[in-house]
Amino acid sequence: MLIDKTSSKPGKQTTSSGQDKQPEQVLLTDMDINIERLHRFLGGGEDVVCRTLQHRSFDNTRYAILYIDGIVEGTTINTLLLSLLDDANNSYTNEKSSEGAGLYHHLTEQSIAIGKLSEVSTIEQAGYSILEGSTVLVVDGSLRAIVMDTTGGKTRAVEEPSSQTVIRGPKSGFTENLRTNTSLIRRIIKSPDIRFDYKMIGRQTRTNVAVVYLEGIAEQEIVNEVHRRLDKIDIDGVLESGYVEEFIQDRAFTPFPLLQNTERPDAASAALLEGQVVVMVSGTPFVLIAPVTFAKFFQSSEDYYQRYDIATFLRIIRMASFFISMLLPSLYIAITTFHQEMLPTSLLISLAAQREGIPFPALLEAFLMEITFEILREAGVRMPRIIGPAISIVGALVLGQAAVQAGIISAAMVIVVSFTAIASFVIPAVNMGIAARLIRFVLMILAGTFGLFGIMSGLMILLAHLCGLRSFGKPYMMPFSPFVPSNLKDVLIRVPWWAMRKRPLNISNDSNVVREGAGQKPSPDQEGA
Amino acid sequence: MVTLRQMATMVILFLIGSSSLFLLGGTAERDAWMSVAVGVLAGFVVISLVTLQIQRLEPDRNLIEIFMLYFGKVIGFVFGLVYVVYFCYKCTRNVREFADLSIMFLLSDTPLSVIMLIICIIGGYAVMGGPGVFFRMTEVLLPILILIYVLIYCLLIFTGTIDLARLLPMLEKGFKPVWDAAIPEIISFPFGEMVLFLMFWRYIDKSSFGQVMRVTLKSYLFAGAFITVMNVVIIASLGSLAGWSTVPLLQATTFVAIGDVFERFDPFVALLFFTAVYVKLTAYYLGASLALAYLLRISLRIAAIPVGIGIFFGSFWFKSYMHQVNVGFEQNIKYHFPIFQMYIPILLLIVMLLRSGVRSRGKVQKQPSSEDSNHAN
């Protein structure tokens, strides 16, 4: 068991970014003073445990372990204590060194039953390690302390992700625990090229953040840029990857997500394999993926598990749903208000009959229903689960049916709004769905005032906006613009796996794009007689 | 930076632009498509021998910089300003076309000023993004537009609206009416308008100017063929009616009916045409703004504001759509536009060839300033 002298505990580098409590205190030879100072550093809560021991072979030299109960793994602590106590009662005749330093070496090399050890020499380093769930061992007479990784405690088990569900595909999802999350990735990608760069963000929360990428496949420029942007963040707390996302996205004002998030280890691994960079934030199951393009938000990991023809069909359905959820109410408003001649006569008559007696113009009618639906949706999300059915009854019956019967809303409008709502649920990425929802309202106003002309103006501005967006320097509208023909194999359609020989160009390291061997198309000849 | 492919899409969309709204070479009647073909070839000669040659001599400068370099500060400035006005005027015409036709086909009750304001705003928004953003937009738009055009043509064929017999007899009155309709009208509009690209070519990410020339000429020919086909479709579906219609192709699509459901989709078709017009007017808007930015040494975002205001108020100058079309087809394309599209460029090219010494001197002096990179983004 060797001590990791260049400890990768991020506490070391970033103590300066923490609050300036007091100047760095070095550990002294007197153990009691060290323990006392550590207690003061940690604020002396009831959950700070200090267990003192004596070693028989080293002149009854005293040593102690400190940890915070609840954030350490109970069984690990017990194993540790067992090994220490067992060792303390043994007598080693050949090692007659009576100083603390001798005991220190003896302990690190022969007695501690913990895998990961490191060494610290100041109160701050020791204190921060304890706060992260490590156990610190101080020895009387030694100027250094041993930090043992005992992080653990109660965490959520790996469960099926609640968002981004699939019918076919792995059922495991990320958890709130960073170590669990990195292990989930490690279990999928067993490549020596995978890199986990850790940093710590948040003055108070000291949240661990991991930048994950595959060296040689990810573009080094982008990895550096991710690091640069993460290093610039100075905030007291990071509770979710959303905090980080808002700091590192390329443009502040846009409804469109410039980073993708996922709860699925397989989706994150797929991103890594395509040369994207994954940012994991401790405390949330949602990891960030960058750089990302507009089209990526319409891909589900299931696209790659189902057959390609089905996946292609589903993808087109999703794209269409996005446009329906963005455009349908505004098209309905524009056509019924300004361009009735476009409707077939019979439909026009039935619509006119329905709208007879409706007191509101189509724009207001649509707004009422859309806002109602948004409220219903939000209520559905925030309500305690038990009250859920009540919402659907009130929403569907009272607001839907009664509003039509009372002659406030036309039945056609209810159909349009419902269809729009269902379409908006089809988009696999929630953050892209929200963008469509916001834009829908703007387009509705434009349609209500300028008809199709207004919708077209809105779409042109939208297109100009989208073409100006970048995600970590990569054009958002790629591969449509700049046009990258080979990337089109996996955008609107998904070609079979044996035909996708290259990783998406321009996202990953372009000198290393071939990901599979040639000529793997199954054919009767290969199967033999 | 702009890729070659983006430039190609830009050339095509720019040339299709507002030409889809008119029957080009209408005076040649059913031989109009031949006039267009002649116009394409004549325009090809002009841009390959004049416009592209200017850029070939100075591949890294735009028109304004070239004027300043070869004509000196004062005369160069005057020529630059003249071109700003020319680009603005062209843009004004497109804005007015767009607005008038919107009122005619989509929004009969909305005031002209409001529509023109919206057009200027959506144009200005793209211009503010710079050439990079605008060229990327055209790259997204072109496939969609071409697809819809093909769809419309297919519908016209399947519903039997297109009758190629209407093109016969060809050259009934000889070749002269065809030639008269083409020269100089069709060169001036739309093919000679390629002079605007002297403002854009320098932003293209190129290893040699030869590439730019090849791609430009290829996409030019594609657009020319496209417009010729469009002309054939118009005449084949409308016959002699084509000359009388306000927007002939739109008129043709009103004959399309699939079952009883898709009868009147001409508002969508109108939007399709307007998208191309929008690209064209924004290209001119961008060209004028870039030119002004270079003349006054200000940033593009600032230059776009006065240009936009100028275009908006300039659009009120035409009394009506008919006035606008008349001014354009009776006077501008015969007398005024050739000045900017041919005479001044030819003059410039001659001066450039004579003063080739300036070029070698200028290369050392003028490095791309920081302002340039600002524009390119």
Image (spheres, coloured by chain):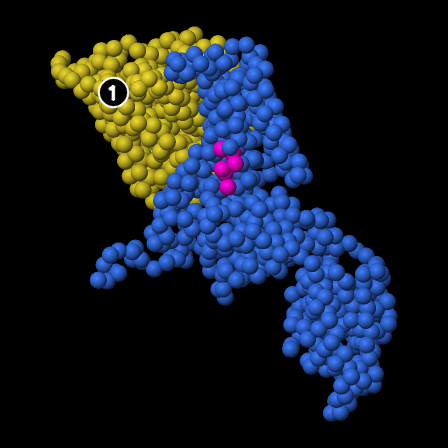
Chain colours: A blue, B yellow
Amino acid type, residue under disc 1 in the picture = Thr
**Badge 1 density bin: few <14, some 14–19, many ≥20, Cα 10 Å:** few
Q: Determine whether B132 is above or below A136 in the image.
A: above
Horizontally, residue A316 falls left or right of residue A262, namely left
Q: Quadrant of the N terminus of chain A?
A: bottom right
* Position in image of residue A214 (x %, y %): 50, 59
Residue A249 sits in which quadrant? top right
Q: Is residue A481 above or below residue B97?
A: below
Residue B121 pos. (x, y %): 51, 23
Residue appearing at x 41%, y 16% in the figure: A347
Closer-to-camera residue (B235/B341): B235
Magenta-colored segment: predominant secondary structure: helix
Residue A223 against residue B276 in the figure, above or below: below
Of the pair B11 and B276, the residue shown nearer to us: B276
Q: Is residue A450 left or right of residue B202?
A: right
Look at the image and tell me whether residue B354 can be seen: no
Q: Observer-nearest residue: A376 or B218? A: A376
Write down the residue under mark 1: B159
- Image mark 1: chain: B
Q: Residue furthest bottom?
A: A94
**Is A12 placed left or right of B193 in the picture?**
right
Total residue callouts:
1
Quick one: A202 or A358, which is closer to the camera? A358
Element marked by disc 1: loop
Residue at position x 71%, y 79% in the image: A111
Residue A425 within the segment the image draws in magenta: yes
Identified at 55% across, 12% down, the residue is: A358
Which quadrant of the rendered structure holds the C terminus of chain A? Answer: bottom left
Magenta-span inclusion, residue A80: no
* Residue at 49 percent of width and 47 percent of height: A166
Indicate the position of residue A40 as horizontal and vertical percent values: 85, 62
Give the residues in magenta. A423-428
